[in-house]
Image: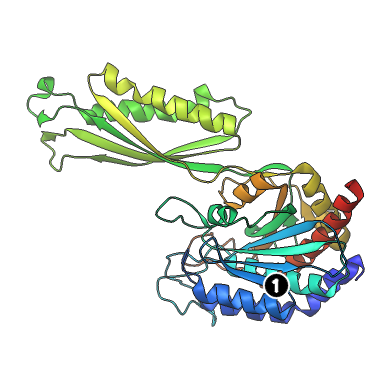
Amino acid sequence: MPTDNFLTRAKALESELIEMRRHLHENPELSFHEFQTAGLMKDKLEAYGYKTKAQVGKTGVLGELTRKGVDGPIIAIRADMDGLPIDEDNPNKYISKNQGVMHACGHDGHMACGLTTARMLAEAELEGSVRMVMQPAEEATDSDGKSGAWRMLEDDALDGASAIIGLHADASLKAGQVGIIPGPAMAACDGFKVTIQGKGGHGAYPETTVDPVVVGAQVVQAIQQIISRRISALEPAIITIGSFQSSSTRGNIISDYVTLEGSFRSFSQKVREHIIAEIDRACSIARIMGGDYKIEYELGYPCTVNNPEITEVMRQAAIDLIGAENVIAVQPKTWSEDFSMFAEKVPGAFMFLGAEIDGDTRSHHSPQFDLNESGLYVGSAILAETARRLMTHFKNKA
């Protein structure tokens, strides 16, 4: 199948792709509960000629396409499967049938694109093997704090793979466009909770207390100055304090303690570690003011870093298929994604697929989120062409 035929073939399959996306949209399942979704992915992959393995990373599915007599690299293609705990509020005919659960981040589109890519690659002559990685639980972790990518890696999902590629719907890009950048593409996102211990008492006698609200206010000021005064202006990072709660429920009671909760996002491990150290330094103000503190961190997904070599193959494939004017050098996203864990295991590249609806940017993770389906086939074609080129790329390097 010549290069341009992946785009032609994907366009020919567009109605089936959209039909699949809408079926998945109507039947979302939460993280690590994607039982029907996983069953559908398995059935479809087997119908295309893939050898499948279920219950990988709890509810994930692997599909392997190997040509007899072909000894080449394995290229993995990932699509995430889980929905979000959101009540959908859209006027479409195809809305969630599962109350309180919604595909509000585009994973329905990712799966539909992935299946179309898998089908086209099964029809093509290839110099290697394809491994479809249908991943559960990108949106949430289990009781051990592990996401779907983490669990799949524990089950050796990428063993033997030379590279992994994937995509994410992006409602800020026009349909038919893609965003591709080498290096850091999506942020690491981590959470923290600070408990500041003071000494409570009556509001009439503040001098006999250590007011944790006052102490906490100083700590918040110090934390908010970390980015502007302790991190280089050349290193993008964000810190947000989203909650400040006192143990007191009355205006004339000075509380014993307050809790602060926040998050921080960064694009390198060095900055990530620096922020952690600076949060601890900021909280030490509590001891200077006569109180004490405890910090609990909830470390999330690491930064997604696109391998320059793999990303360039993807970029050139996209340019050849849809033209350089539609391949956008986007800025790194402050979103966080556990594709990052796959890309730490093997070289990876992750692109953003345009899904804007007629100038209406539907916010991800909102009840009104939706995709412009007219650009989905483009994502399938680029993934397929990138996979094929990577097989040739690695064979030539061997």
Q: Give the image's coloring scheme.
A: rainbow
**Is residue 75 toward the left or the right of residue 334 in the image?**
right
- Residue 104 visible from this viewpoint: yes
Horizontal relation, residue 72 to residue 245: left or right: right
Q: Residue at x 17, y 33 (%)?
A: 256
Residue occupying image coordinates x 79% and y 75%:
11
x, y percent for residue 73: 81, 56
The residue that appears at 26% across and 25% down in the rendered structure is 292
Judge by depth and name the residue closer to the eye, 279 or 152.
Answer: 152
- Element under disc 1: strand
Considering only vertical position in the picture, is 190 above or below 233?
below
Residue sitting at x 74%, y 57% = 178
Residue topped by disc 1: 51
Q: Is residue 99 above or below residue 264?
A: below
Instruction: Single out the residue that lies furthest toward the top.
Output: 288
Image quarter of residue 222: top left
Residue 90 drawn at (x, y percent) = 50, 74
Residue 34 is situated, as x and y percent measured from the top left of the image, at: 50, 70
Amino acid, disc 1 = Lys
Residue 299 in the figure: left or right of residue 122: left
Residue 10: x %, y % from top left:
79, 73
Q: Quadrant of the N terminus?
A: bottom right
Q: Is residue 337 above or below residue 284?
A: below
Q: Residues within 10 Å of mark 1 (few under 14, many from 20)?
A: some
Quick check: can you spot residue 357? no
Front position in the image: 320 or 129: 129
